[in-house]
Image: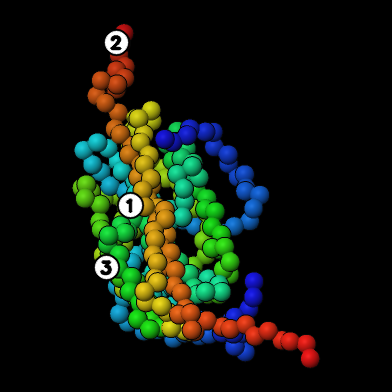
């Protein structure tokens, strides 16, 4: 795979830097989910990011969250994942309760602007995939080197 | 449905992966004991539920791969396999255990034995 310009900013990926700063902020605002997997700094949900030629794919483990209870929005270079997990409706006496429920919100700033018209999100077996594209004019251009 | 298999004991998978302890809710309903087990990224075929005597074990593995053409640039969680075991306190009708998977959550219903099935043991005097 071709390397991206923003993939190679002096050793540390700009993504890492941004996520680190944001985790601090998210920790202040997001509700805590007992038993759920949190980002190292405490944001929920924990997010992995994959980069490709056209943009980024974010993934998050959200078992038991219905797609109708999820709202993904993108504005310029930020993506917001907002949602809720409902408690079971048939539970009477709990023996053990480890799965959190309630509302959550997490905002992620990307190292580039995203095309707001081309945000795709899907839930597969409890894993959220958010596919974000860079606007065409923002994508790295490959310059052909011509022999003299 | 759950597959009843003999306990494999300390056997290890050949692939070295992180094994997570899946978050679980356990509660009573009219029908019996319900277990809700978070198994994100797991397809129903990749789950193995075994009951040996009173030991209930759930094992599941994920097959996560980066989307084609993409590579990992930031990681906050490590996808992996899941394993969890519970010792059941009460009697369970093992033949009627129901397992259903939806949205990455496994729901196990462990029905209580029906009254008619309870074995009566005659106590003889003398």
Which numbered disc, 1 or 2, marks the residue that appears first in the sequence? 1
Number of numbered discs on residues: 3
Which residue appears at 27% of the width and 62% of the height?
A: A69
Q: CA distance from mark 1 to mark 2?
A: 46 Å
Q: State the image coordinates of residue A99 (x, y, percent, origin top left).
A: 33, 58
Q: State the image coordinates of residue B108 (x, y, percent, origin top left).
A: 36, 42
Q: CA distance from mark 1 to mark 3?
A: 18 Å
Instruction: Determine whether label 1 and label 3 are within 8 Å by CB.
Output: no
The N terminus of chain B lies in which quarter of the figure? top left
Identify the element where label 3 is drawn. strand
Identify the element where label 2 is drawn. loop
Q: State the image coordinates of residue B32 (x, y, percent, origin top left).
A: 27, 37
Q: Is residue B7 above or below residue A125?
A: above
Q: Is residue A96 above or below residue A130?
A: above
**Badge 2 is on which residue?**
B125
- For this rendering, which residue is in front, A91 or A52? A52
- For this rendering, which residue is in front, A59 or B5? A59
Which residue appears at 38% of the width and 84% of the height?
A: A76
**How crowded is the residue under tag 2: few (<14 C-alpha within 10 Å), some, or many (20+)?**
few
Q: CA distance from mark 2 to mark 3?
A: 63 Å
Chain letter behind tag 1: B
The C terminus of chain B lies in which quarter of the figure? top left
- For this rendering, which residue is in front, B84 or A26? A26
Q: State the image coordinates of residue A22 (x, y, percent, origin top left).
A: 41, 83
Which residue appears at 65% of the width and 85% of the height?
A: A143
Which residue appears at 26% of the width and 26% of the height?
A: B114
Q: Is residue A109 visible?
A: no
**Badge 3 is on which residue?**
A103
Residue B25 circle label: 1
């Amino acid at each position: 795979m071709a390397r991206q310009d923003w993939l190679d900013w002096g050793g540390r990926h700009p993504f890492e830097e941004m996520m680190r700063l944001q985790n601090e902020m998210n920790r202040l605002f997001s509700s805590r989910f007992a038993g759920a997997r949190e980002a190292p700094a405490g944001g929920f949900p924990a997010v992995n990011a994959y980069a490709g030629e056209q943009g980024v794919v974010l993934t998050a483990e959200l078992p038991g969250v219905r797609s109708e209870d999820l709202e993904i929005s993108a504005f310029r270079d930020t993506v917001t994942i907002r949602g809720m997990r409902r408690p079971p409706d048939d539970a009477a006496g709990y023996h053990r309760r480890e799965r959190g429920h309630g509302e959550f919100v997490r905002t992620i700033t990307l190292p580039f602007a995203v095309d707001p018209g081309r945000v795709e999100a899907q839930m597969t077996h409890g894993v959220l995939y958010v596919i974000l594209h860079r606007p065409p004019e923002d994508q790295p251009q490959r310059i052909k080197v011509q022999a003299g | 449905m759950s597959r009843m298999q003999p306990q494999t004991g300390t056997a290890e998978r050949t692939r070295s992966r992180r094994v997570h302890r899946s978050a679980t809710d356990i509660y009573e309903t009219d029908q019996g004991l319900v277990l809700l087990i978070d198994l994100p990224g797991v397809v129903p075929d990749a789950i193995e539920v075994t009951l040996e005597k009173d030991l209930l074990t759930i094992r599941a593995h994920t097959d996560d791969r980066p989307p084609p053409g993409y590579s990992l640039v930031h990681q906050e969680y490590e996808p992996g396999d899941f394993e969890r075991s519970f010792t059941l306190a009460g009697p369970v009708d093992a033949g009627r255990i129901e397992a259903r998977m939806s949205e990455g959550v496994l729901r196990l219903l462990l029905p209580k034995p029906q009254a008619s099935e309870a074995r009566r043991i005659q106590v003889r005097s003398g």
